[in-house]
Each structure stands twice: as structure tokens, then as C-alpha cells.
């Protein structure tokens, strides 16, 4: 996993730099200068654009990864043409149903309804930003596109937030600039991709002679099938759209802040998944199922370990975080969302590699059944649970949908392909994390009252720093001492050796 490790580390660094910038923006800019309703507006617009752009891709991102080992650079032309056709289709549907969609949001979220006309433009930007990023990833160059997505967009948005926050621009211009930041990101990804291929525009020409009828039929069947399965990775996007219509933009804003915290849990998989998928696709193509098992177990183990560790560090500091952010009391109702959604992110990031295995295998059409189960359960549970528990119900719908989906999917992978993502090391991870959460409970019950006799900011911060250092160090030391991950231990040992030499 040499190139996977290198690119994953670089991609993860880009992701976490974006997370750090996003943390400052989300908790000290958004909550200060935007109302809950305006936060909800930006969240629903982006989530809707991402969802519709995924539909407009017509499965080309998955097919680019799957067929690159077979067709090489010839898939690039296909990856540009099909999304354009998909965008025209989705754009036509958005225009045709513009009236009913605006009416759906007009009662609970009038601000969202006012700016719904910008959705087609934002969808186009999000679509081709992702297309260019995927083309770079199959060339094992993911760091720069990750920087653009995770850092660039946030910095562009920060400029818009500050201009609006200091009332230098109107709300209308702010929303236009917010959407335009994704257009700038799209162009940056395009320029980087052209630089990788040495500005050879011929690489992106569709080669009709190479794509014989048989190849077009095989590629088209897979691509169209993946269009039907696109909702699997976008259940959280469905949640915010439901919340905007059923609970209003203000509560959607509270949910948005809470979900941002939870999203940090799956940041590592964004880079590890992007760089491991082409390797998994190659192993599946070669029918090397021993290698598929090895890769998927490694990815699943390390994602479980990393995602639970991040969740743990978030959870032990959550009350302090809400105490420090501007207008934190207005957003503190999202604590339950953070807990439930974080668990959902742990499940999704740990087992999503199983979805990739099925999609790249000859049984990929079976994925449609699992996607139908996931989508229908998410829609049904959102409709039911939002009415019962509000924003907590939407988060619970995500968690329950993922548990049902992965339970059935992983069972099928074992029965049909003898691929299992589970290993004994994962039980070690669960045991270590259970002990860590127990220690946090003990600390909160007995040590926090001594360290924080008053609710002053300095006392809260002192308790949070000490708890993070002590419990975090104990957690990492236990993981190393118990050799939960031999790969991680080897990396640490090499670092120690270099410093001592």
C-alpha cells in the first residue's frame, strides 16, 4: 500500500487543513454573522446541488474508476460527455418542477424558496468540480483537488461571509458569491488536470473507433446502473432537504452546525477511499480475491480506528465547544445530532469499501437492491422520525438506514464473493474505545467538578485541554501497546528510529 499510504497521508493532511479552516469559519464566523436561517439556506443549497450533481454524473465517476484499468486515458472523454447530458436532463427537470419545489419550501423556509433559481448553476459547478477531481484521482494525484475542495472553497466562502457580515454586500450578492466559489473551484481542478496531462486536449477526445459497440454496451450498462445507485452515499443530503421542508431553515441551520462536527469523523476516508478504490478495482478485475480481502480489511480496520478516535476526541470536548462559539446556546440543541450522526459516520466510513467491492465486481447489478433498501428506509425513517424527534430524528434515520444497509450488503459479499471486511483487530478497537469512553465518564463525574468549580471560560478550557491530553495520550498508548494495527506500529517505529539515528 505504498502509493496508497503516501497519497492518503497527503490527502488527509489537505482534508484536515480544510477541517481546521472550516472549524474557524463554521464556529466563529458563520454563527456570528449569519442567522440560523441563513446558515440553513447555505446548507440546503449546497446539499441539493451535490445531490443533483451526483444524479447528473450518470455514474461516470464510478465507471471512470472501474474502466480506467481497462481503457486507460480513453475514459476521460466519456467522463466529460455523459455528465453534460446528465446535467441537461437534471436541469430540465429542475426547471419543469421549479414551481412545486418552491412551494414545498415556501411555508417553512421562504428564504430557501427565494434562491432556488440558483440551484441549476450551483449544480453544474459541483458536477464538473467532482468530474475533474475523479479524473485526477485515477492518475493517483488527489492532493491538489482535495486542497481545492477542502481548503479553497472554504476560503472563497469566508470572503463572502465576511463581506456580508460587515454589511459590505447585500444578501443577494452574498448568495451569488457563495455559489460562485464552487465555479472557481471547478476551474482550478480543470487547470490542474490539464497540467497533469501536459495540456493535451486530445486526451479528452471521445475515441469512437476504440469504443466498439460491445465496449459501449458494457460501459453504458454499468454507467446507467451506477446512476440508479448514486443515492447510497448521499443519504445525509436527503436529510437536510427533508429538514428544510418539514422543520424550517432555522432548525436546518442548527442541524448543519451539528452535522459539520460529525462530518469530521469521516474525513480520513475521503482521501483513503479515493486512492484505494482504483487499487481495489484492479484487484477485482484480476480476480485476486485474496488481495481484495487484504485491502478491504486494512481499510476497514484503520477507518474504524481513526473514525472512532476522532469521534472520541470530539465527544469529550463537545460541551466546551458549544460554550465558546458565538450564539452557542442557539445551536446547543444539536448535541444529540452530533452523537447520532457521528456513529453513523463511523459505520459508513468503516464499511463503505464493501460497496466499492460489489460495484467493481461482476455482480454489481445486485447493488441496486441494496441501494433501494437504503434509500427507501432513509426516506421512510426521515418522514416518521422527524415528526417524532425533530432534528434528532433525522440523524437517527441516517444511522438506522446505514446499519440496515451494511448488515445486508456485507452478508451478501461474504456469501457470494467470500469477501469479509471483519477481523479480530476490529474487536480490539471496540474494546479500547469502550474503555476510553468509560474513562471519560469517570473524569466528567469526579475530576471535572474539581477542575471546573465555576463555569468560567478559562476553567472550561483548562478542563478540556487536560482531559484531551491525558485521555488522548492514554488511548493512543493503548492502541500502540496492544498492537491493534501492526501497520500503524511500524510507521511509529520507523519515525522513532529516524529520530534516534
Image (tube, grey):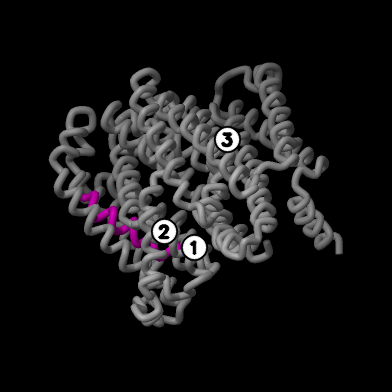
Front residue of this view, candidates 162 and 40 = 40
Q: How dense is the environment of label 3, judged by Cα within 10 Å: few (below 14), some, or many (20 and up)?
A: many
Residue placed under numbered mark 2 in the picture: 222
Of pointers 2 and 3, the one earlier in the residue sequence: 2
Residue at 54%, 26% (x, y): give it. 319
Q: Nearer the viewer, residue 119 or 68?
A: 68
Q: Which residues are magenta?
A: 118-134
Using the image, determine if residue 70 lies above or below residue 425: below
In the image as oriented, which residue stretches furthest toward the right?
Answer: 501
The residue that label 1 is drawn on is 66
Magenta stretch encompasses residue 125: yes
Q: Can residue 209 be seen from the camera position used here?
A: yes
Main secondary structure of the magenta stretch: helix
The residue that label 3 is drawn on is 314
Dots 1, 2 in contact, CB < 8 A: yes
Q: CA distance from mark 2 to mark 3?
A: 40 Å
Marks 1/3: CA distance? 36 Å
SS assignment at label 3: helix
> Where, quadrant-wise, is the C terminus in this rendering?
bottom right
Label 2 CA crowd tier, 10 Å (few <14, some 14–19, many 20+): many
Name the residue: 26% across, 58% down: 87
Amino acid at each position: 500500500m505504498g502509493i496508497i499510504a503516501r497519497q492518503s497521508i497527503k490527502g488527509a493532511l489537505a482534508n484536515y487543513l480544510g477541517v481546521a479552516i472550516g472549524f474557524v469559519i463554521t464556529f466563529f464566523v458563520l454563527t456570528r454573522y449569519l442567522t440560523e436561517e441563513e446558515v440553513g439556506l447555505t446548507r440546503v443549497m449546497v446539499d441539493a446541488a451535490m445531490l443533483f450533481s451526483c444524479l447528473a454524473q450518470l455514474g461516470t465517476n464510478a465507471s471512470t474508476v472501474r474502466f480506467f484499468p481497462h481503457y486507460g486515458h480513453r475514459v476521460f472523454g466519456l467522463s466529460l460527455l455523459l455528465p453534460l447530458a446528465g446535467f441537461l436532463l437534471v436541469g430540465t427537470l429542475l426547471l419543469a418542477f421549479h414551481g412545486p419545489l418552491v412551494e414545498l419550501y415556501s411555508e417553512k423556509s421562504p428564504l430557501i424558496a427565494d434562491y432556488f433559481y440558483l440551484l441549476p448553476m450551483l449544480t453544474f459547478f459541483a458536477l464538473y468540480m467532482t468530474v475533474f477531481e475523479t479524473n485526477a484521482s485515477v492518475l493517483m494525484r488527489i492532493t491538489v483537488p482535495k486542497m481545492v475542495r477542502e481548503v479553497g472553497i472554504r476560503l472563497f466562502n469566508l470572503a463572502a461571509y465576511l463581506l456580508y457580515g460587515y454589511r459590505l454586500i447585500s444578501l443577494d450578492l452574498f448568495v451569488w458569491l457563495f455559489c460562485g466559489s464552487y465555479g472557481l473551484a471547478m476551474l482550478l481542478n480543470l487547470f490542474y488536470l490539464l497540467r497533469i496531462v501536459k495540456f493535451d486536449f486530445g486526451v479528452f477526445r471521445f475515441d469512437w473507433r476504440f469504443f466498439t459497440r460491445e465496449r459501449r454496451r458494457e460501459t453504458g450498462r454499468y454507467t446507467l446502473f451506477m446512476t440508479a445507485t448514486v443515492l447510497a452515499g448521499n443519504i445525509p443530503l436527503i436529510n437536510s432537504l427533508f429538514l428544510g421542508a418539514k422543520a424550517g431553515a432555522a432548525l436546518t441551520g442548527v442541524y448543519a452546525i451539528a452535522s459539520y462536527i460529525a462530518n469530521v469523523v469521516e474525513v480520513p476516508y475521503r482521501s483513503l477511499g479515493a486512492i484505494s478504490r482504483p487499487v481495489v478495482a484492479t484487484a477485482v478485475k484480476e480476480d485476486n480475491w485474496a488481495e481484495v480481502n487484504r485491502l478491504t480489511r486494512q481499510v476497514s480496520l484503520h477507518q474504524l480506528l481513526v473514525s472512532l478516535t476522532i469521534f472520541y476526541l470530539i465527544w469529550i470536548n463537545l460541551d466546551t465547544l458549544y460554550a465558546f462559539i458565538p450564539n452557542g446556546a442557539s445551536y446547543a440543541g444539536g448535541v444529540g445530532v452530533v452523537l447520532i450522526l457521528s456513529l453513523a459516520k463511523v459505520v459508513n466510513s468503516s464499511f463503505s469499501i464493501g460497496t466499492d467491492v460489489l460495484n467493481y465486481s461482476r455482480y454489481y447489478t445486485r447493488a441496486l437492491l441494496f441501494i433501494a433498501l437504503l434509500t427507501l428506509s432513509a426516506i421512510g425513517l426521515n418522514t416518521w422520525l422527524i415528526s417524532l424527534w425533530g432534528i434528532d430524528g433525522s440523524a437517527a434515520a441516517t444511522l438506522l438506514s446505514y446499519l440496515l444497509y451494511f448488515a445486508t450488503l456485507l452478508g451478501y459479499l461474504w456469501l457470494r464473493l467470500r469477501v469479509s471486511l471483519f477481523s479480530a483487530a476490529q474487536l480490539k478497537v471496540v474494546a479500547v474505545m469502550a474503555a476510553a469512553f468509560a474513562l471519560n465518564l469517570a473524569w466528567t463525574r469526579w475530576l471535572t467538578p474539581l477542575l471546573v468549580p465555576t463555569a468560567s471560560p478559562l476553567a472550561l478550557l483548562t478542563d478540556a485541554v487536560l482531559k484531551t491530553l491525558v485521555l488522548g495520550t492514554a488511548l493512543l498508548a493503548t492502541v500502540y501497546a496492544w498492537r491493534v494495527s501492526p501497520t500503524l506500529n511500524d510507521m511509529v517505529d520507523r519515525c522513532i528510529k529516524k529520530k534516534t539515528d
